[in-house]
């Protein structure tokens, strides 16, 4: 039989041994790169930065950006010089893609059709929570390392061959569920159940599948995990802890007081691990079993934390924007991308797990989600500790900026709609208590509106991916959109 083919077969499109030497699989990674000294990790980063810069100079987007800033090849000798390169953000990507549709010059493919014809590729997009989703083309290399990075995090959190992981996130153009499913099936010997979100598989059926198939690990967003636990009790009459869940891996957001984690651990009876990632970066940071901060995936990316106003590095413990350089990307290379995600460096000291990788605190929200109210900068995600400070709430909220008139005088107000549990009992003093805490945390007085459980499902997009925490209703702002 003639087996000759000219098709770009996936399993022939990469030197797999070379890939795994450069980017070790989870168990090898856990005992090698992950435990290297800080000096050895920095040496690897320097080497990979040189490769990224060489690729950048071949890319028309970066050539224009860097040359316009007066940078010439050879000017950036290492990580100590990286701040000389101009950062860019999602607005620059959107402008590039509008000017050079559909993928922009940043894609780096001189002949896009030839790229697609000769090599396996995937198209992913951002979540679109801050506007139109951004297209990100990735070749087999980016696809594999994205899955590998998720697999590494899962392994270091305790996932092992033979486990069954349920992934209630819809496999769409978003990268998250694809990366986790591939991490389980291709790199961990774990059975992934890609049940999708509630639109695809209702919560009642999600729980039924979990019991039928022996699910012992979960990956989902916190809001939907709480919903599933509720469904387990109300629709099945069972305690979700009967599943004997080994662990839950999620994206906790600004859970600085650990109230969200504690509530999920109580519901599911197992450890809950936090993670951080984006469409462009892949799995950027994760908690190990010690849970002393989120380890940056230092061999894949270099993270900086910069002041939101000045763009200068901030000291450890201070909040700033995450700026990332991704070492492994060649299609759609990323060099000093300002993610506009707020974070702070928690520690550069070795972790109890033995790793010297730097650790950040929980993801603290987005700097471009900031709301200017009466001269004060307000971050909607900062409402989380106040809303979760009382067990009578479900922990869900939605901020709404709107125009108001009192005694014939117009002004701007920020209302925070807070869900209360159906079994909360008397609500005396609850709005006042949350309002006082919000004033302390946000720096302004806000209105607190208590709404019944389930009322925020649709407006806050609960259970279908990232929750929405802010709605703009002010006429002056809407007019300029």
Image (cartoon, helix red, strand yellow):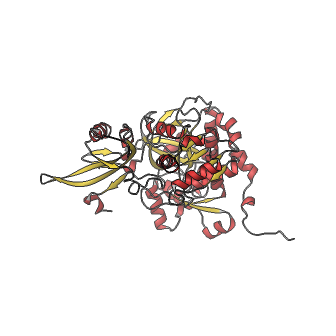
Q: Name the spot of residue 59 as percent of width and height, x first.
A: 57, 59
Q: Is residue 109 above or below residue 358?
A: below
Is residue 46 at least partly visible in the picture? Answer: no
Decide which of 27, 405 is in the foreground and name it: 405
Decide which of 195, 312 is in the foreground and name it: 195
Q: Name the spot of residue 22 as percent of width and height, x first.
A: 69, 46
Q: Name the spot of residue 154 as percent of width and height, x first.
A: 62, 43
Quarter of the picture holding the C terminus:
bottom left
Residue at image x 30%, y 41%?
427
Residue 429 is left or right of residue 381, and the answer is left
Quarter of the picture holding the N terminus:
bottom right
Residue 432 is left or right of residue 234, and the answer is left
Residue at image x 64%, y 67%?
116
Decide which of 135, 382 is in the foreground and name it: 382
Decide which of 271, 367 is in the foreground and name it: 271
The residue at the far left in this view is 407
Quadrant hosting residue 426: top left
Q: Name the spot of residue 68 as percent of width and height, x first.
A: 47, 56
The residue at the far front in this view is 237
Residue 94 is left or right of residue 192, and the answer is left
């Amino acid at each position: 039989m003639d087996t000759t083919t000219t098709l770009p077969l996936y399993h022939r499109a990469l030197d797999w041994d070379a890939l795994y030497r450069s980017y070790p699989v989870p168990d090898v990674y856990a005992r090698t790169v992950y435990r290297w000294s800080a000096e050895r990790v920095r040496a690897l980063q320097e080497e990979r930065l040189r490769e990224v810069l060489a690729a950048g100079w071949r890319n028309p987007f970066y050539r224009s950006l860097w040359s316009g800033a007066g940078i010439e090849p050879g000017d950036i000798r290492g990580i100590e010089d990286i701040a000389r390169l101009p950062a860019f953000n999602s607005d620059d990507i959107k402008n590039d893609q509008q000017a050079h549709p559909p993928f922009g010059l940043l894609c780096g493919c001189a002949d896009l059709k030839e790229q697609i014809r000769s090599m396996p590729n995937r198209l992913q997009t951002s979540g679109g929570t801050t506007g139109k989703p951004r297209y990100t083309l990735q070749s087999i290399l980016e696809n594999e390392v994205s899955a590998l990075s998720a697999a590494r995090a899962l392994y270091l959190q305790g996932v092992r061959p033979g486990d069954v992981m349920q992934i209630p996130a819809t496999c769409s153009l978003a990268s998250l569920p694809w990366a986790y499913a591939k991490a389980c099936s291709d790199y961990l010997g774990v059975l992934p159940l890609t049940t999708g979100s509630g639109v695809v598989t209702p919560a009642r059926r999600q729980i039924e599948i979990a019991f039928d198939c022996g699910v012992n690990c979960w990956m989902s967003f916190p809001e939907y995990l709480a919903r599933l636990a509720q469904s387990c009790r109300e629709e099945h009459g069972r305690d979700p802890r009967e599943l004997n869940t080994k662990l839950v891996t999620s994206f906790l957001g600004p859970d600085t007081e650990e109230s969200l984690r504690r509530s999920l651990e109580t519901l599911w009876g197992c450890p809950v691990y936090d993670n951080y990632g984006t469409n462009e970066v892949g799995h950027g940071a994760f908690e190990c079993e010690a849970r002393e901060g989120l380890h940056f995936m230092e061999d894949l990316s270099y993270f900086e934390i910069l002041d939101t106003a000045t763009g200068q590095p901030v000291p450890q413990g201070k909040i700033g924007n995450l700026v990332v350089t991704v070492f492994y990307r060649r299609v759609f290379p990323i060099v000093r991308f300002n993610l506009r995600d707020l974070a702070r460096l928690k520690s550069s000291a070795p972790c109890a797990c033995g790793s010297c990788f730097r650790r950040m605190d929980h993801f603290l929200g987005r700097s471009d989600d900031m709301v200017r109210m009466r001269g004060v900068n307000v971050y909607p995600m900062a409402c989380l500790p106040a809303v979760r400070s009382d067990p009578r709430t479900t922990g869900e909220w939605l901020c709404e900026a709107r125009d108001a008139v009192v005694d014939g005088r117009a002004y701007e107000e920020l209302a925070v709609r807070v869900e209360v549990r159906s079994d909360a009992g008397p609500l005396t003093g609850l709005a006042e208590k949350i309002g006082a805490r919000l004033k302390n945390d946000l720096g302004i007085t806000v209105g607190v509106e208590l709404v019944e459980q389930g009322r925020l499902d649709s407006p806050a997009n609960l259970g279908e991916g990232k929750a929405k925490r802010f709605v703009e209703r002010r006429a002056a702002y809407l007019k300029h959109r």
